[in-house]
Image: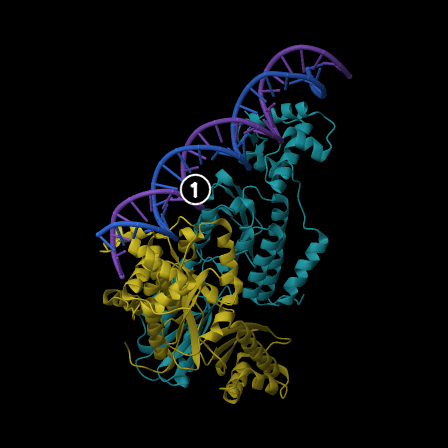
Chain colours: A cyan, B yellow, C purple, D blue
DNA sequence: GTTAGCACTCTCGGTTGTTGAGTGCTAATC
DNA sequence: GATTAGCACTCAACAACCGAGAGTGCTAAC
């Protein structure tokens, strides 16, 4: 079905993709020649276009319109016509500089990463926080706030901090809390939540309450971890003609909120530094049929990782997007590595 | 200019507002009579409509269309024709029940409050977290995570928890951290951030670093506190015909993100249990000209308060919205009072 | 004060032309 | 054999037009 393409045909396909991505309008034979000063005639281009259409790389919205890339056209483009795009060095410096501003604040870094991605691509940036597949306890602390109210602070392996207010049946001194926490901390360090839950049964009173709560917090995050996702750049993306139609905005919001996005795409991005591209109909989910998604995994180690990427219309600037996703994921990984392993100052 | 209205004129205005809010279509004299079985003729209604139009309560989109309420029409409606709407008891029970599920988790309660508001009004719910106008330190804790990495946890008067990772120049033992924190805690309890910043100058090394960081955290939240806002129900709201037009979605997103909303409206809602309504052109901000906003202040005390409310098109069900905002703000205040003053179990 | 009657106005939805970009095919040309 | 010129054809997009229907304001009668 799909045979080899001549050099000129590949060139034409490349130009069509780029032109269409830029303008958003179907590309005709004459317009293509005018704009890119090809030294062949429209008819020749039309012949080649005919071939490309036969090979399923292009399609016709209607008889008298220009050609538009199909999903497989984009796929061919990113795979064979794109090379290995790099973020320009000046841009790299600018990005690194921005990250150096936020220091070691994980939350701020993530927001920044999203902002950079959104900015560079003009589309929607996605990012999920770094999580361990199997979270364990690193440390917890009990703080007495008032007679019968205390605060539980939990730090897990991935460096995430959780908090919960606990109401007690009877007043407890801070000293009691401190000794309890010191003792329990030693016992449950590096344990995952099922183990903790089991141990809670062996205790009663304060200790049991605390252990139960810790287990509950961890269980909850484990369940949420796939769904939790921050997105950025939606309002700018909506300015694009693709999205100007009314209910697309609503559809997009639901897509982002629902998080079906991550739960479907997450398993497909296997390891750190792996970058995956999903174009239109390649997406299993119906809602994603008309979008393109670029997703990469980032993280400090192979254990604790998060995802980041870009979501846009199938008509998106894949070159810029891909290079930016790849670069930002590297920067973020570097940064996390500093937090997780006492790395050198940068 | 605006004189008295006859009983029938008020009735007609009320019906027009309600009908228009429900259907979204300009209301004609005949349609009004048909739908509400008035025992007067269309011509009479037309005469009254004429009067209402002269009084600026109604307006004509064009010659041959029905009437539509103006902003002052809505204003008259909420002030004179609405009474004091209450949430139906069954609804009250449902809401209370939902809140009892989330226990004392402040963050979860806020999300729930937003969800309830959005649900009841079909519009966008707004909520800003409870903050004190003048935050003071309640307690902080230092936790050593690794040789040269420690975690700072800060609890402020309003019950908000902040966290920050701190990198140290040289390794410090947990014991050192504990004694330092115990000592400093006593010293800075109940102080606002400028005082803390001042004291940090008197110390050096670890203590100085910690105090500076605490001051920085508090300063940052103080600045952000006006801007921070959670919103809910956007995607559902976009389903409404008012919002179906393309770029309204974008405009709304920017409005919500920018937080111009709160920084403008916040100062106008003076104290707890105060409920304010802004209709269309009554809003100073241009972006808000075609929206209606209902905002109430909630909180545990007069010191620590937050805002919640509803944003929708000027054409919104004011009765339901007002009663729900008022009720939810009460429920949330009750709940916060439990967290802040060791209240009885509920 | 209320109502019937009537001429008038203006949006909305569908139909109809017109325009222009683009195509596919064939025959001539390099 | 690949390329090109020429030409008839197609179809979306846009504007102009038209009739139907809902609603109005006014006047005169009740």
Of A71 and B126, which appears nearest the observer? B126
Which residue: 54% across, 42% down?
A314
Which residue: 60% across, 87% down?
B199
On the picture, is A153 further left or further right than A6? Answer: left
Residue B138 visible in this rendered orientation of the protein: yes
Name the secondary structure under disc 1: helix
Residue A293 visible in this rendered orientation of the protein: no
Q: Indicate whether B243 appears above or below B308.
A: above
On the picture, is D29 further left or further right than B4? Answer: left
Of A54 and B149, which appears nearest the observer? A54
Question: Could you tell me residue A264's position as x and y percent?
Answer: 45, 47
Q: Residues within 10 Å of mark 1 (few under 14, many from 20)?
A: few
Corner quadrant of residue A17:
top right
Q: Indicate whether B84 appears above or below A272.
A: below
Quadrant occupied by the C terminus of chain B = bottom left
Question: Could you tell me residue A56's position as x and y percent?
Answer: 55, 29
Quadrant occupied by the N terminus of chain B = bottom left
On the picture, is A107 further left or further right than C27? Answer: left
Q: Indicate whether B33 appears above or below B150.
A: above
Question: Could you tell me residue A106's position as x and y percent?
Answer: 55, 65
Which residue: 65% across, 65% down?
A100
- Chain letter of the residue beneath label 1 in the structure image: A
Which residue is the site of mark 1?
Answer: A286
Question: Could you tell me residue A47's position as x and y percent?
Answer: 63, 23
- Marker count (numbered): 1
Corner quadrant of residue A41:
top right
């Amino acid at each position: 079905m799909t045979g080899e393409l001549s050099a000129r045909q590949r060139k034409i396909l490349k130009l069509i993709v780029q032109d269409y991505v830029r303008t958003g309008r179907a590309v005709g034979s004459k317009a293509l020649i005018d704009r890119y000063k090809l030294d062949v005639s429209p008819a020749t281009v039309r012949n080649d276009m005919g071939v490309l259409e036969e090979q399923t790389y292009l399609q016709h919205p209607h008889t008298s319109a220009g050609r538009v890339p199909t999903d497989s056209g984009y796929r061919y483009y990113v795979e064979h016509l794109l090379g290995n795009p790099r973020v320009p060095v000046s841009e790299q410096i600018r990005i690194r500089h921005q990250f150096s501003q936020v220091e070691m604040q994980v939350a701020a870094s993530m927001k920044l990463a999203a902002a950079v991605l959104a900015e560079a691509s003009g589309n929607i940036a996605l990012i999920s926080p770094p999580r361990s597949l199997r979270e364990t306890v690193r440390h917890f602390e009990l703080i007495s706030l008032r007679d019968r109210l205390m605060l539980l602070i939990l730090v897990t392996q991935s460096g995430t901090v959780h908090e919960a207010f606990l109401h007690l049946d009877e007043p407890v001194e801070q000293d009691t809390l401190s000794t309890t926490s010191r003792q329990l901390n030693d016992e449950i360090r590096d344990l995952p939540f099922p183990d903790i839950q089991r141990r809670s049964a062996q205790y009663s009173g304060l200790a049991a309450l605390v252990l139960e709560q810790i287990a509950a917090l961890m269980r909850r995050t484990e369940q949420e971890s796939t769904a939790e996702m921050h997105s950025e750049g939606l309002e700018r993306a909506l300015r694009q003609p693709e999205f100007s139609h009314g209910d697309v905005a609503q559809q997009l919001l639901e897509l982002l909120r629902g998080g079906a996005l991550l739960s479907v795409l997450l398993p497909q991005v296997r390891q750190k530094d792996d970058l995956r591209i999903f174009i239109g109909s390649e997406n299993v989910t119906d809602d994603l049929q008309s979008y393109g998604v670029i997703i990469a995994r980032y993280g400090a180690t192979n254990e604790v990782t998060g995802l980041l990427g870009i979501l846009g219309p199938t008509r998106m600037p894949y070159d810029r997007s891909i290079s930016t996703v790849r670069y930002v994921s590297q920067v973020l990984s570097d940064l996390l590595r500093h937090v997780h392993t006492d790395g050198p100052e940068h």
